[in-house]
Every structure is written in structure tokens, then in C-alpha cells.
Image (tube, rainbow, N blue to C red):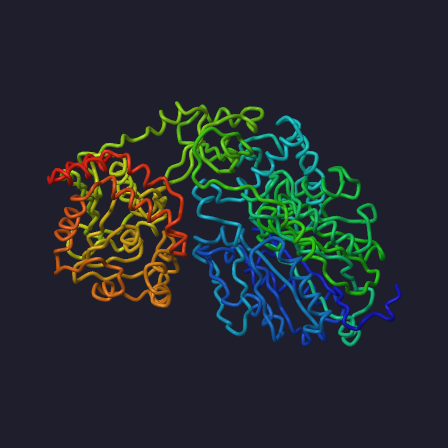
Amino acid sequence: MQYDGLDPRTPVLVGVGQVSEQLGSPGYRKRSPVQLAADAAREALADSGAATEVTAAIDTVAGVRQFEISAPGMPAPLGRSDNFPRSVAARLGADPRRAILEITGGHSPQHLVNELAGAIAAGRCEVALVFGAEAISTAQALTGAEDRPDWSEQVGGQLEDRGYGMQGLASMHRSAHGLTDAPSQYALLENARRARLKQSRQEYAASVGRLFAPFTKVAAANPHAAAPVERSAAELVTPTGDNRLLADPYTRYVVARDKVNQGAAVLLMSVAAARRLGVPQERWVFLHGRADLRERDLMDRADFGSAPAAVAAARGALDMAGVGVDEVATFDFYSCFPVAVFAVTEGLGLKEDDPRGLTLTGGLPFFGGPGNNYSMHGLAETVHRARSAPGSFGFVGANGGFLSKYSVGVYSTAPAEWKPSNDADLQSELDTVPAPVEAKHADGWATIETFTVKYGRSGDKTGIVIGRLERDGRRFVAMTQPGDTEMLDLLVAEQPIGERVFVRSFGYGNRVTATPQRMEQLLPTPPLVLRESYEHITVRRDGHLLEVAINRPEVRNCLHPMANDELEHAFDCFFADPDLWVAIITGAGEQAFCAGNDLRYSSSGKPMWVPKNGFGGLTHREGMTKPVIAAVNGYTMAGGFEIALACHLIVADATAQFAFTEVRVGLVAGEGGAIRLARALPPKVATEMLLTGRRMGAQEAHRWGLVTEITGPGKALAAAREMAARILEGSPAAIRSTLRLMTETAGITDTVAATRHPSAVLDELFVSEDAIEGMLSFAQKRKPRWVGR
């Protein structure tokens, strides 16, 4: 190869390393992720041919996150380092000026190489070491052992911690519908692809077996593989005791294997540094093409069965390298699930039986899926193959999330000048595709767009459906109700996609059944009649007035899902009952109106939800055309404050304290509090309260107009009753019309434009019985007899 004339800042990969160990194998050392990564880094340094010189020259180290630090609250039963990159560097004797801890995602090894190669080309870096490791197998095996190792390390020092990077990969709404694990979410993509191809279950399973059987053969010959067992196509997809179903259509053998002890590292530097440090040119491998693109969030994808961002990244990297798919000698595709391979190879026109093969390691289900670091191993193998066939090209495709982030590298020993990235243009083109509109609360007839069935170890099954509502085409996610064998039978049939189903929304999520009748059998609609008694609230009806009291004084009237549901039912009944005209909501006891969410309950791991109409059944409720008064005593905080703000009027006793304390526990006033407070108070005052969590007393709240009336201690409910009595003197129809008109014009800032707003309110009121009664009673000089119509 001719390396003369290259820009001295051209990046080159000069060293790669891999290490592994299996439980009980000869020489098993119970190595931690830091130790495995350090040993892999030593291999990479040695592979460069100039280990001693290079170590001192390392100015940047970048670590791939281990599984135990890839999401909030992940356990580390044997301990962990407080600075993974610098722990590894210290073991090597290196003291880099910059240490990076990358975000979560299997794309991160290739992304880091792309990024740091760019930093080298720009002169911001000269010698960079990238590494990652997992010791999940050892950690799980030794957690309860008496002689378990302690992997805790406190090294401190500079660290560019980029966070988890989970935005778009997880949501409270998807989690509430069982989409908390990778198999179920990839299964949605897999089943959508099968439907697009119009293949039977048997045909698709056979294609998965044909895809992965060659992978097992590669893994069986790989000394670093976690499951080096060659299996037939049929064996891979046939459910057995050892190969149990996880999520339709997946058996255990065809999904990523996480019980591994593996580490890998890559060393890259500028051409100038390689020459100065004496790295032999036969070790040099150039990054000819690269791309880093992001797919739309799961529920925003136009087609679940394809991966346009991954395909665009692959094509973009090949185009940058100036080579076609037919000119590539080796491929290593990220293979956590079959669709992760199928979707990209299909987009590139590759067949599942391409003679070049689709993996160099054996793939994630067989070589092992070591957290986020798998592609570092694929990259290491690609470098070895490129060196063994000078001038050939190797392709690495690395996937993060749920085909969410895709990074690609095209490598060769042939020299190549650094080229500017085209990622921004490619991403912009992907982002122009319209996204489907999602219905968070879905009700009515619908069509299944994709689905899966999750299989528990105890034999329980849960169906998950993504569908489209018939009436407007909006997309939704829903779950089956426990015991709904009829719906499960439909989902395990030959092809559920396209079938008509019925969906209904609840505070805890959407539920899907075969028919409305079946829905009513499983989840009967509660009658809109106030119950004689509730468990967590009390209700009192006094003529046209309804009083509702949160009755949990032992926890300052904090609310959990069951209390919220009872409040929603009570207010559903209030707004549906034509003989109830005014409502009061208050809190039992003397300490608090409501101090918000019951954090002890929410931190217990039990299911959490908020009713469809929001906290207290009020904060998200539309059409509040009957007046609701909050009678506030004591602490009115967080969700309790949100309930009070959702009411039309607030009567507070002198002890009342208002506050949004969410920021102090890492939350936000997301049930309307941040929005309503900013509209009820001057912006600076509202912002200060929301950002600091400070308490505002009743007197200050009254000065700002937040509180309608202040009473003496313990007198708020009595004053609210007096206020309700004054309201009840007016026409209920006129009061409802007034509130409707105020709501309709609330967003119109120009006063004259608001007065000209076309509304049916006045015409409807004009012909109402109350309007006629009001005029007659005035003419007859008597007290009106309102009927509320």
C-alpha cells in the first residue's frame, strides 16, 4: 500500500483486542468489567506493535456503558467503578486528559470510533482508546456467594458522562402497556415484517432458522463465544423446555444472549502519531465510510416492519467509501433479534444465505450480546480480516435501542483521506416523513397493525397490540386483560394483523378485546351513580351540592391510584347528574388538603396510573361547565396543588401552604400544575415557585389572586359551603353557559376579538327553561325556580 501524501491528521485504527472467560473454565479469574476492559485494551495496545510508546501518548479514553450503568436504578451486586474509563486507564498506566462515558446503546462502539476519528481529523485529539466490557455472567453467578469479589472503585477525576441517552427509547405510556423489555418491542417489528411479506408463521420461522444457523457455526469456532454450539435451523426455532417462547415469534435461542464475560477495545490515532510512535504500517486500517442516524421513536414509525434509518446509514457509509455492496468482503451486522439483520440486509439487497456471511463473531444470540459493547468485537474481527486481505473492505453495522440508532463503519487497509459527514442531510430526509398521530386514550373499533404475546415462566400470557382506530386512523398501543382467552386465541392464530378488534381506555391504560360485549364482560362500565360508600374518599349530597373529601389523613391525604380512581368516579357522577349543580372538594383532617402523590406507594414497585381525567379526576378533565370549589386547609402541595388549580374557585384557611415540590424529588408538576400556575400568577412568581419548590402562604396567594377567599383555621369548608349557596342562587344553565364562554375564549388575547368569538352559548341559553324562568320571575317579582335546563 502507498501511504505517502496522506494528511498527517488522517485517522487510522492501529490496534484491536478481545478477551473473555467462562464460569469454571481453566484460568477463570472472576474479572470485573474494569479488569476485562483493561485486559482487552492491553491486547489492543500490543496489537499496535508499539504498546510502550503508545500508552503514554493516549490523550482520550472512551468507555462503553456496562449493563449495570445503562439505565437508572440498575443493580450492581458486586459494586462498580465511579469512573469506568479512568479505572481502565489507570490499570494501563495512562493518564489521558479526556475521559468519556458514552450513552446507552449497542451503536455506541461504532459511534465512538466515528466520533473520535473525526476529532483526530480535526486536530482535537491525537491518540484515542475505546473500550467496553461486561461481566454479567460472573455477577449473576457470584451475587450470593460468600467469597464474592468486590468490584467497587473510587478513582474520581475528570469524566464526560453523557448520561443514559434513553430519550425516545422508553416512555411511561409504553411501559404501562407491557413494553418494558427488548423482546416484546422487537417482536412488534418482527411480526409487522412477516405481515408485509405475507408469510405464514411456519415460513417466517424457517427463514429465521436459515438466517441464524450459519451464525451458530461461526460462534462454535470462536474462542470468545459465550454459546459455542452449532445448531440446525429447525432447532433454533422449535420451542422446547430449553428453548422456550419469550415473545411471539421469539424462542430463547434467537435473541441476544446477555450472560457473558467479554471485553473488547480499539486503538486509533492520527497518521502523524502512528509514524512518530513507530506503529508499523501493516497495522493501519482506515475508516473509509461512516454514518450515524436515528430512527423515529417506536410509535412514530410509518412502517414497523422496516428500518429506513439503518438502511440509509448503511448506504450512506458505503457511498462515502465509494464501494457497492458487492465489493464488500466481510459483514458484521448487529443481530440482537432476527429483524435487526433482516431489515438492513433486505434494504441492501443481501440474501440471508449470502456466501460472504453476515457475521464475523457468531452474532449476539450465540457469540453473546455483552450489553452495549457487542460491536466492538465485530469491529475487532473486521480489522483482523482487513489486515489479512489487504485492500478488501469490511462493513460493521451497530444498532442501538429498538432499531432506533444505527452507526456504520466501512474499513480497509487501503489508504483513504478523511471526508466530511453527510449525516445531517440524510437525517433531514428521514425526518420529513410524516409520523402517525398517536391516541394515548383509545376507544372504539380498531384494526391490528402489529402485535406480540409475551410468555411468562409460569405459563402466563399477555397480548400487546398496536392498532389503528377505525374512526380517525390514529395509532394506539393496548394490552389484553388477564383472563381474556378469546383475544389471546386471536393473537396466536395464523395472522392477527388486519383483524378487527375493540379497544377501550382506562386510567391504567388501553385494553383490547375481540368485541364490545367481551370488553363489558371483563371490565364492566361502572354506573354513573354515587356509591353509598368509598374506601378512600367520602361524599355528601346536600340538595344540588356535592361535597367530596379525600379521606386519607394518615398520609396527609396523598393519593395513590385507587384513591384517584374513586375521585374520578365521584366527579364523573357529578358532571353527569343534572340535579347536581355545584361541587366542593376538600381534605379530611386538619393537616392537609392533599400533599400530592403517595410517594411511599409509588416507590413500592406496585402499578402506578392516573385516571384519564387526571389527578383527582380533575386536572385533565374537559368540559368542566359546573363550578367546583376547592376548600383548602393546611398542606396543598404537588398533585394536591394541581387539583386546587383545576378548580374554578379556591377557599383557603389561614394555615394553607401551597407548593410544587416536584423538582426536589426529580419530578415535574406534569398534571397541569406547571401550565396553570404560570397562567394564574405573574410569570416570574410562578417560575420561582416551580423551580425552587418554595411554599406560598394563604395571605400571599390571596394577594396574587390565586385564592378567592381566606378564612380562619378550620373554616375553609364552611366558607366554601356559603360560597356554593351564593352560586346556587343563580341559574345553573346560565352558570354553565358562563363557564363555557370563558373556556371558549380563554386563548384569545385580544379582548375585542374575544367578544366577537362565534359561539352557540348565548343562543342556547336564550331558549333555555332557566332563561324563560328568570325573565318571568323578574316580571312577577318572585324568587326564581331554577330547573337547570
The residue positioned 39% from the left and 49% from the top of the image is: 756
Horizontally, residue 319 falls left or right of residue 749, namely right
Horizontally, residue 465 falls left or right of residue 364, namely left
Tell me which corner region of the image, top left, top right, bottom left or bottom right, holds residue 698.
bottom left
The residue positioned 56% from the left and 29% from the top of the image is: 497
- Considering every residue shown, the one lying at the far front of the view is 779
* 185 w.r.t. 685: above or below: above
* 662 w.r.t. 628: above or below: below
The residue positioned 22% from the left and 35% from the top of the image is: 772
Tell me which corner region of the image, top left, top right, bottom left or bottom right, holds residue 572.
top left
* 567 w.r.t. 693: above or below: above
Tell me which corner region of the image, top left, top right, bottom left or bottom right, holds residue 590.
bottom left
Residue 369: x, y in percent?
Answer: 60, 49
- Considering every residue shown, the one lying at the far left of the view is 782
Q: Report the front residue among 742 and 141.
A: 742
Q: Report the front residue among 95 and 407.
A: 407
Residue 25: x, y in percent?
Answer: 60, 51
Residue 91: x, y in percent?
Answer: 59, 70
Q: Quadrant of the N terminus?
A: bottom right
Q: Report the front residue among 717 and 729.
A: 729
Q: Report the front residue among 572 and 96.
A: 572
Q: Quadrant of the C terminus?
A: top left
The residue positioned 51% from the left and 34% from the top of the image is: 472
Residue 284: x, y in percent?
Answer: 79, 64
- Considering every residue shown, the one lying at the far right of the view is 2
> How many labels were placed on the picture?
0
